[in-house]
């Protein structure tokens, strides 16, 4: 889903400039609602995968369209910054509250209900959007370059798939070849954008140091946050033993922290220089990742909740100010291109974070469990236990007794090592983002 959304976000920016950003938003909302309804009643794996891909493409219209509309609706800097804070708070709360809502729905309803919950929201947007949202289109907008879309999509999918294959099967010629091909396609995509009069992604925006700094402050922490999140959800349920609903409740403070931090960002920006705010927020978030290294200890749940709250309170202002800097670095008619770059950076960074952290974490987990395997298991059971922590817990429960208990303890200890690695890696990534942003913001702006 992330791969399709990466390419779609950039393509939708040009499409929105041509047909109208409000119209594109409403078309995307209709497609998202319809795909959600079909996904809820999917009767095969292939059908569900197809609907998930369509949800990725349709969902990629929402963020760039809404962000570019905000750029043209609010010309006052303080009002625009507050609007972006509300926008970021809404997205952050939705993303963080997703596990809670999903846990409640799965606890009391069928699995398809997690898709149906989006349908009334999209219907509300379709009813109110035409009356409340202004339309904007760029009369000089160019045509959508389909080769660029294909290059972008192929590059992203090749690189992410190769990273996962390298983690699962080790060094082999096929994933190395795919990774090299992905990097080559990415280079070809960049070269093509430089030649186009109206590129899919306007790389000329990177000539502005403030724009590049904001992209770094938004993209690099997204790598770390998405990368650590896949470990947090498993840790809550498979290590701490929480049910889906309880695990969802444990993420509520994280969601509230994002809402509060996003709404506080405009007020902080009136008192503190944006560059200093980005650097401090990223530095504090590095501390939160460090705290997550202790989440596998005696007071794991309390430490995890405290660390995620600190993470959200520190990163929410960073994301809000960075997005404001991104869309104001471009003229109003290029707001669609700027917002597409912002969304593409977030989507691609999230996909890379999941693939990279998840892949290396899987290697650490398997290496640790192989060394600590308490008994000689059959190849099938050993394969299931080494594949995922969930598989190890299932095998341990089927074995039962002292053997099962020892296997589950060994699997959880190995997963704790992977979690600590992910937390340490996340801290280094956000510290690198702080250094890059501070360095770029010290440069004078270019005409």
Image: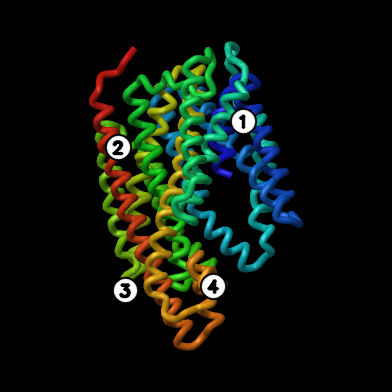
- Alpha carbons under labels 3 and 2: distance apart: 33 Å
- Alpha carbons under labels 1 and 2: distance apart: 33 Å
Q: Is the Cβ of the residue at disc 1 closer than 8 Å to that at disc 2?
A: no
Which residue is at a point 60% across and 30% down the rendered structure image?
A: 150
**Whether residue 139 is situated above or below residue 390 in the rendered picture:** above
- Alpha carbons under labels 2 and 4: distance apart: 50 Å
Query: Which residue is identified by label 2?
Result: 278
Residue 62: which disc?
A: none
Q: Secondary structure at mark 2?
A: helix
Q: Earlier in the sequence, mark 4 or mark 3?
A: 3
- Alpha carbons under labels 4 and 3: distance apart: 34 Å
State the residue in front, 73 or 183. 183
**Whether residue 279 is situated above or below residue 395 in the rendered picture:** above
- Alpha carbons under labels 4 and 1: distance apart: 61 Å
Query: Which residue is identified by label 3?
Result: 298
Label 4: how many residues lie within 10 Å, few (<14), some (14-19) or many (20+)?
A: few
State the residue in front, 84 or 199. 199
Q: Is the Cβ of the residue at disc 3 closer than 8 Å to that at disc 2?
A: no
State the residue in front, 332 or 8. 8
Would you say 380 lies left or right of 284 here?
A: right
Which residue is at a point 58% across and 11% down the rendered structure image?
A: 140
Query: Which residue is identified by label 4?
Result: 379
Query: Which residue is identified by label 1?
Result: 132
Would you say 254 lies left or right of 106 here?
A: left
Q: Position of residue 313 (x, y in %)?
A: 35, 49
Residue 7 occupies quadrant = top right
Q: Secondary structure at mark 4?
A: helix
Label 2: how many residues lie within 10 Å, few (<14), some (14-19) or many (20+)?
A: many
């Amino acid at each position: 889903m992330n791969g399709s959304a990466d390419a779609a976000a950039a393509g939708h920016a040009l499409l929105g400039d041509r047909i109208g950003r409000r119209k594109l938003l409403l078309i995307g909302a209709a497609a998202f609602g319809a795909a959600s309804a079909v996904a809820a009643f999917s009767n095969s794996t292939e059908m569900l995968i197809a609907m998930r891909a369509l949800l990725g493409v349709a969902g990629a219209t929402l963020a760039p369209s809404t962000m570019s509309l905000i750029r043209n609706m609010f010309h006052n800097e303080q009002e625009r910054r507050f609007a972006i804070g509300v926008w970021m708070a809404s997205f952050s709360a939705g993303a963080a509250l997703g596990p809670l809502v999903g846990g409640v729905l799965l606890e009391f309803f069928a699995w398809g209900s997690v898709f149906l919950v989006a349908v009334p929201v999209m219907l509300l947007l379709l009813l109110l959007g035409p009356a409340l949202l202004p339309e904007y289109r760029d009369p000089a907008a160019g045509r959508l370059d389909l080769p660029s879309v294909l290059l972008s999509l192929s590059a992203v999918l090749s690189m992410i798939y190769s990273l996962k294959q390298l983690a699962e099967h080790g060094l082999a010629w096929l994933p190395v070849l795919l990774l090299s091909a992905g990097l080559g396609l990415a280079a070809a995509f960049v070269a093509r954008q430089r030649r186009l009069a109206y590129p899919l992604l306007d790389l000329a925006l990177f000539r502005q140091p403030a724009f590049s700094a904001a992209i770094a402050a938004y993209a690099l922490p997204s790598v770390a946050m998405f990368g650590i999140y896949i470990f947090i959800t498993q840790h809550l349920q498979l290590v701490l033993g929480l049910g889906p609903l309880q695990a969802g409740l444990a993420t509520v403070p994280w969601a509230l922290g994002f809402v509060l931090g996003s709404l506080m960002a405009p007020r902080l920006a009136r008192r503190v220089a944006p560059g200093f705010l980005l650097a401090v927020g990223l530095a504090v978030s590095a501390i939160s990742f460090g705290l997550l290294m202790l989440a596998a200890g005696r007071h794991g749940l309390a430490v995890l909740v405290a660390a995620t709250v600190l993470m959200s309170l520190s990163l929410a202002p960073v994301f809000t100010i960075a997005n404001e800097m991104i869309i104001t670095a471009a003229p109003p008619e290029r707001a669609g291109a700027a917002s597409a770059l912002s969304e593409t950076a977030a989507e691609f960074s999230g996909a890379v974070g999941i693939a990279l952290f998840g892949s290396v974490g899987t290697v650490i987990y398997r290496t640790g469990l192989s060394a600590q395997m308490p008994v000689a298991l059959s190849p099938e059971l050993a394969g299931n236990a080494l594949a995922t922590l969930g598989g190890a817990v299932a095998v341990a429960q089927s074995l039962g007794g002292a053997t099962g208990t020892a296997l589950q303890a060994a699997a959880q200890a190995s997963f704790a090592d992977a979690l600590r690695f992910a937390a340490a890696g996340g801290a280094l990534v956000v510290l690198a983002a702080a250094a890059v942003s501070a360095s770029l913001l010290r440069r004078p702006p270019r005409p």
